[in-house]
Amino acid sequence: MARRKKTNKKKVFLTLFALSLLVGGLYLTTTTGFKLLHGYILFKTMPKEEVLASVPAPLKLAGENDAVELAYNEEVLNWQPEIGEEMGVLTIPVLNTAFPLIHGTDDPELDRGVGHFAGSVLPGEADNSVLSGHNNTVFRNLGDVGEGDELIVQTKSGTYTYVVHTVRIVDEDDRTVIVSTDEAQLTVTTCYPFNELGFAPDRYVLVADLVDSQVNQLLAQFNE
């Protein structure tokens, strides 16, 4: 009799244990417990590369756009042309003309267009940016440019608009043409008199102030 009671208790225990496993299984398959267990198994069995690939990409914050734009601007602001590089275009609206802008002011550069004096700052920067050209080629009509006229310089870094406020004629040895300035200034020079063959004793000078700047996000390209 005692043996039969012991057997019945064992059956009851096994039945309850089976029911608990069934209930626990249902819980795991219908609740977040299953998700946790499934994720743990995947993490332990998937290759490392697949685990990393399965991680969601972080949300892109609005501020990251500013960081990207700043990186572009740093590239633009750090740009420095090489001697002989076609770095932009000088447009003179009153003459309805535009000329290639070459970095350097030796004969090889001036034979190709308007030269940018390498010892001066780039157009658009604070200080005095100096441009030169031959008086019998690109600047043969520079005498028709006067106070109030625009000079537009487009470089790889942006577009800069200047307005002429001073016209003067100086001796060829006058170094005030390239003096440093506190504000962004453009100085344009050529030999004078115009169309003079051979030696020209003077320099015709336009001095202009920067009135508008449009800085590129990326460096522009010019055909050479």
Image (tube, rainbow, N blue to C red):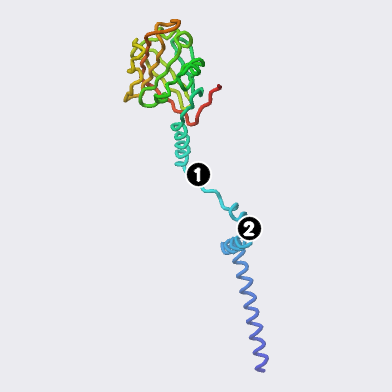
Residue of label 1 = 60
Q: Residue furthest bottom?
A: 1
Q: Quadrant of residue 41?
A: bottom right
Circle 1: element type: loop
How far across and down, in percent of the image, does residue 199 sit? 42, 8
Work out whether 157 lies above or below 67: above
Circle 2: element type: loop
Using the rendered image of the protein, determine whether residue 121 is visible from the camera's viewpoint.
Answer: yes
How far across and down, in percent of the image, does residue 203 sit? 38, 11
Rendered residue at 44%/37% (across/down): 70
Circle 1 residues within 10 Å: few <14, some 14–19, many ≥20: few
Q: CA distance from mark 1 to mark 2?
A: 27 Å
Q: Nearer the viewer, mark 1 or mark 2?
A: 2
Say if mark 1 contacts mark 2, CB within 8 Å.
Answer: no
Between 190 and 182, the residue placed more toward the observer is 190
Residue of label 2 = 47
